[in-house]
Amino acid sequence: MPEPHRERKDHGLRYLFDEVPNPSPRVFGVPCPERVEVLSPVIPLLETKAVVVDGLLRGVDDGSIWSLEFEMGSPDHCRLIEHHTAVARAYPGVQVETVVFWGRDRAEPHVLRCGRASLEAHQVFLAAMDGDGELHRLRRVVAEGRALTSGDILLLATLPLMHHGQATWNVVEAAVPLAAGLPANLERGVVSAMGALAYIALKPEERPFLLEVLGRMPVGEELFEDLRAQGEARGALSQARAAVLDVLAIRFHAVPDAVRREVEAADRLEVLRAWHQAVVLAPDAQAAADAILARR
């Protein structure tokens, strides 16, 4: 079972990517497409039920898949390779790239290796970035009345993981007000990711200082409780989507792209449950696909 602080990170990042328009990591120097769409980070696996990545994007123009992972301490190379492999299997015939964002003190490239398996991933060293300079630049953008771009928003959310000359909780205290001019859901997405990333990056004895800072702000510590509730609701949807796709894969050995897109886009549990029953009872693959695509 995931530890609570890791659940905070998962929910915070999921909330962020759901709310940021066109969250391309190009701003970090990653050669990702300029236009991307957000996919469900839950990858169904028949043998182990599911793998959950921190973020999953698809290039709008070229269809490439980009899996995002945030690592705070000693990396679990086996998990990173497993996640990359699961995404590649879920999207056969498509270019799949993994991007690893390193927090804390890791600031140099290294090979992600597990036994004989290795992973060539794009690596972003947040701990090597000038967080104080980035905070100053974002303050200037806001002070001049200019709108934050999608790239600015991603940088703002990840500020706590960059290099600073001050404590992480002080960085959060200075950075949270910069999100105040964003639409309400986007503001909460940025602050939730910022708070969750800062929380997991801190040592246990340092976390109370962060919670004290958040408690003095309008978002408050209740944000995490709200975030947990939203995460549970989204988790139920993810499980329902995975159940439909699992049955299709088991019974008919393939899931047509149009059907997969329709299932991944579904946001009502009652619809997904009806589809699950339909594909269980369908006499053949075409009937199963028709049951799902008939809603369009």
Image (cartoon, helix red, strand yellow):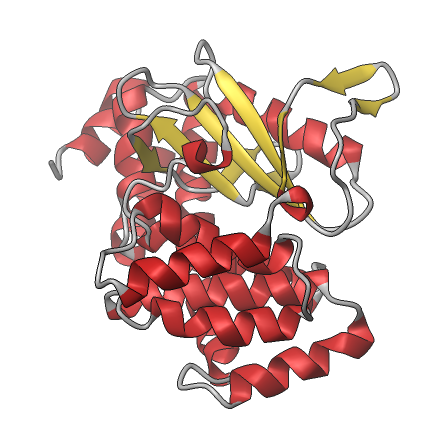
Q: Is residue 54 left or right of residue 288?
A: right
User: In which image quadrant can residue 121 be found?
Assistant: top right
Q: Which residue occupies the foreground of this view, 22 or 264?
A: 22
User: In which image quadrant can residue 179 be found?
Assistant: bottom left
Give the residue furthest to the bottom.
Answer: 216
At 54% from the left and 20% from the top, the residue drawn is 88
In the picture, the quarter occupied by the N terminus is bottom right
Q: Which residue occupies the foreground of this view, 16 or 210?
A: 210
Q: Which residue occupies the foreground of this view, 286 or 258?
A: 258
> Can residue 232 be seen in this snapshot?
no
Is residue 57 placed above or below 6 in the rendered structure? above
Q: Which residue occupies the foreground of this view, 56 or 263?
A: 56
Is residue 273 placed above or below 205 in the rendered structure? above
At 31% from the left and 48% from the top, the residue drawn is 272
Q: Is residue 286 left or right of residue 152?
A: left
Give the residue furthest to the right.
Answer: 115
> Can residue 186 be seen in this snapshot?
yes
Q: How many marks?
A: 0
In the picture, the quarter occupied by the C terminus is top left
Give the residue furthest to the top.
Answer: 93
Q: Where does the image place residue 122, in percent across and percent down from the top left? A: 60, 25
Q: Where does the image place residue 128, in percent across and percent down from the top left? A: 67, 43
Q: Is residue 126 left or right of residue 104?
A: left
At 79% from the left and 73% from the top, the residue drawn is 204
At 55% from the left and 68% from the top, the residue drawn is 195
Q: Where does the image place residue 175, in percent across and percent down from the top left? A: 47, 68
User: In which image quadrant can residue 33 be found?
Assistant: top left
Is residue 277 placed above or below 46 in the rendered structure? below
